[in-house]
Image (cartoon, rainbow, N blue to C red):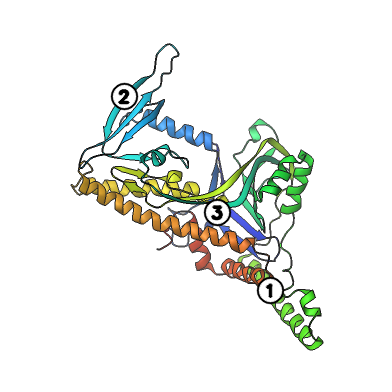
Amino acid sequence: SGRIAPYDAMQVWESDGPAILNFTHDDLNEKASNATKNEVLGAVIEDLPMVASLWDELRSDGAVDLISPASIKKIVPPKNDEKLEITFERGSLSPESPSTTETIGTNLLIAADGGNSFVRRTLGIFPTVSFGYGRQAVTCTVAIDSSIQKIAFQRFQPNGPIALLPVWDKSSSGDKIYANIVWSTTPDEAKELMALSEGEFVERINNLLQSGPTASPPLISNEFKDAMPKPISDALNGVDMVSQTISSSLTMSGMAERQRGFAVPPLVTEIVGRTFAFDLNLMHARNYVGPRVALIGDAAHTLHPMAGQGLNLGMGDVECIVKNLKQAVESGMGVGGTAGLEYALQQYESERQREVVATMGGIQFLHGVFGTTFSPAVHARSVGMNIINSAGPIRRKLVQVACGLQGIGN
């Protein structure tokens, strides 16, 4: 209970340009009534308490037959209209009681067993596309010197973004305020960061997060301009000045229009607990469904955490498959035979693959756009960010899609 940290704003800025993106909970409320208005933009929830809460719900739900602990040993695909068979070992909570092996049949097996899904690998009917981003995420909990003011901060660098995220209020256990760091970078820099002393690591974090928007790099390199005849060099300098002026003016007008300037993140004072590093990979199953089986969540897709969409997509999978199974039952087709179940699963797969693939494409685009150091592309990115920040309909659409309130195609 209480292990949740809501935030009502997100500030995104670049390391080599003046642009800022500010998203707020008001971006969710354009058409909402007073009764349905969102007071938060998002939330950071700790994994272990969330999972424990879900287990508690399962144990207390009288409609669920919970078999735990247990481990699947064998899956036999169905023949024709028969049920799928699962052989599992039921563990014992008592050392004196031996485990037992049982087999059950089911109309539908939903694989929600993570990125390394045993069900997906065992059945062998779910080919996947996967690749590494060539990045690692370095993450830890930190103490900060002042309140984070319910703002999630994210600064993009060529190697990847660094984020400072709120955590649940631990003030009752002392006077310290905490936040989470998620820093995506190259494996070499991740290795370097993991080897730093605590003081050195804190200094590196603060150097990045305390640096606000800057001027864009020269549109055309000085070396190239110096090699040109003076009239051409002067013309190129003029183009450069115009581009810099446009980017800076758009940033300032966006701040004035929305009455939101750059918010300086709080200072990190110390690292709390362990620091972890892990590889960032993309994986996507070519199909989400098979005979009497469906993949959901990380068993079907994993992606870069920069936009925080992994859990959101998984919850979207749950909502979608429940909706389609419910429609099959209420229509009278049911899920015992193959016709109703196949239709429901095909609808689920079609709806979710469109959404997931579009999200993956968007995140891959961001990964490339913010990873470039090519000056003309950096200038174009700054202009694009400023346009999004000022253009309410575009900004609100992005926020509503990211929060799962709208589909990408809606």
Q: Is residue 68 above or below residue 315?
A: above
Please state which amino acid type lies under the numbered disc 3: Ala
Residue 12, given in percent of the width and then of the height, sits at: 63, 58
- Which is more toward the observer, 55 or 306? 306
Left or right for 11, reference 59: right
Tally the marks: 3
Q: Is residue 307 above or below residue 82?
A: below
Query: Which mark's residue is nearer the viewer, 2 or 3?
Result: 2
Residue 51, given in percent of the width and then of the height, sits at: 48, 35
To which residue does mark 2 refer?
Answer: 102
Please state which amino acid type lies under the numbered disc 2: Glu
Q: Is residue 8 visible?
A: no
To which residue does mark 3 refer?
Answer: 307
To which residue does mark 1 refer?
Answer: 249
Q: Quadrant of the C terminus?
A: bottom left
Q: Secondary structure at mark 2?
A: strand
- Residue 219 occupies which quadrant of the picture? bottom right
Q: Earlier in the sequence, mark 2 or mark 3?
A: 2
The CA span between labels 1 and 2 is: 69 Å
Q: Residue furthest front?
A: 124
The CA span between labels 3 and 1 is: 27 Å
Q: Earlier in the sequence, mark 1 or mark 2?
A: 2
Left or right for 207, reference 273: right
Q: Earlier in the sequence, mark 3 or mark 1?
A: 1
Q: Secondary structure at mark 3?
A: helix
- Residue 322 occupies which quadrant of the picture? top left
Crowd band around label 1 with a 10 angstrom C-alpha radius: few (<14), some (14–19), many (20+): some
The CA span between labels 2 and 3 is: 42 Å
Crowd band around label 2 with a 10 angstrom C-alpha radius: few (<14), some (14–19), many (20+): few
- Residue 291 occupies which quadrant of the picture? top left
Q: Is residue 357 visible?
A: yes
Residue at image x 38%, y 40%? 111
